[in-house]
Amino acid sequence: MREELILLKQRALQNLAQSQNLDDLNELRVKFLGKKGELTQILRGMAGLSPEERPTIGKLANEIKEDLEREFSQKTIELKQQLKSQKLEKEWIDVTIPSKIVLGHKHPLTLIMDEIKEIFVGLGYEVVEGPEIELDYYNFEALNTPKDHPARDIQDTFYITDEILLRTQTSPVQIRTMEKRKPPLKIIAPGRVYRSDAVDATHSPMFHQVEGLTIGEDITMSDLKGTLEIFAREMFGQDRKSRFRPHYFPFTEPSAEMDISCIACHGEGCRICKYTGWLEILGCGMVHPNVLENVGYDPERVNGFAFGLGIERIAMLKYDINDMRLFFENNLRFLEQF
Ligand code: DAH
């Protein structure tokens, strides 16, 4: 029996040395040391031993059992450690690699819109909105635009019915605001407008405008010029020069277009200003007395000025963009630059 025990120990240790994973190891533990394992089998033979032999064999058996158990736990620890370092080796992460976190951000047109709003809010203007689906009355009639005016042509305007259309300008918000409120007023009205234009580098059937309206007593053309000059300098830089050219709009009299000195060449003449040194940025004028009458104001007592500008145009000038389609195509390589 002593021999059997010693042989068992040897075999167990040999097997142990060869086992490569925790499953093998468990199997071996059961095979040699389990309840029905080989050691138990051998110890069953104890009954046939003489009383003198029993204590020594018993002691030996216990020693072997303890030895083997120690070896098994030792080996278990080793294997676990091995597994862990293998895993660490395989799954390492280089925390020093620079990461690229892409955050969402505002569209360039929204940035320009926000900037314009901030400037006028700083000048005491209030931001209001009006509908994009509009009545002919607000878009044209009340704005002193006669029935035979070319802007009312079906070529230029998206009509829904004879009387309902997609607004071609933000100017109808002037009428809607004045109808609802009493003077004095200082409002801007940003929003989408629609025109029946084919898409190209400078045209889009949908684009954005900001309308402005000031109504009070004894408002003059100097108020208009002062306000818009402040705006142009805030928007395009303090050294910006501006000039006003006579123009025609049905809803203002007199009317003008405002130019700023070219932001690229500062008036020298270049590709962007088409070698004139000037860039047109908006339309404006003193509100026509007929418009004031249409909303029930007395043109003898109140007057004011109005202006309207195209957001896409301002954004193209400010960011030196030569194709309006870029704003609407949502190509990330374009948008990510802002
Ligand atoms: N509504 C005009 C347009 O779409 C722009 C404009 C010009 C608005 C003069 C105004 C203004 O309020 O006074 O071209």
Image (cartoon, rainbow, N blue to C red):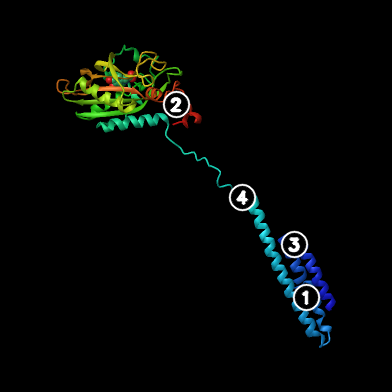
C-alpha gap between disc 4 and disc 1: 45 Å
Query: Could you tell me which quadrant the C terminus lies in?
Result: top left
Which residue is under mark 2? 327
C-alpha gap between disc 1 and disc 3: 20 Å
Mark nearer the viewer, 2 or 4: 4
Ligand 1 in which quarter: top left
Q: Mark 4 or 3 closer to N-term?
A: 3
Residue 192 in percent (x, y) is at: 37, 26
Which residue is under mark 1? 40
Q: Mark 3 or 2 closer to N-term?
A: 3
Q: Residue at x 16, y 25 (%)?
A: 217
Which residue is under mark 4? 92
Question: What amino acid type should be assigned to the residue bearing mark 1?
Answer: Thr
Circles 1 and 2 in contact, beta carbons < 8 Å: no
Circles 2 and 4 in contact, beta carbons < 8 Å: no
Q: Is residue 83 visible?
A: yes
Q: Mark 1 or 2 closer to N-term?
A: 1
C-alpha gap between disc 1 and disc 2: 84 Å
Which residue is under mark 3? 24
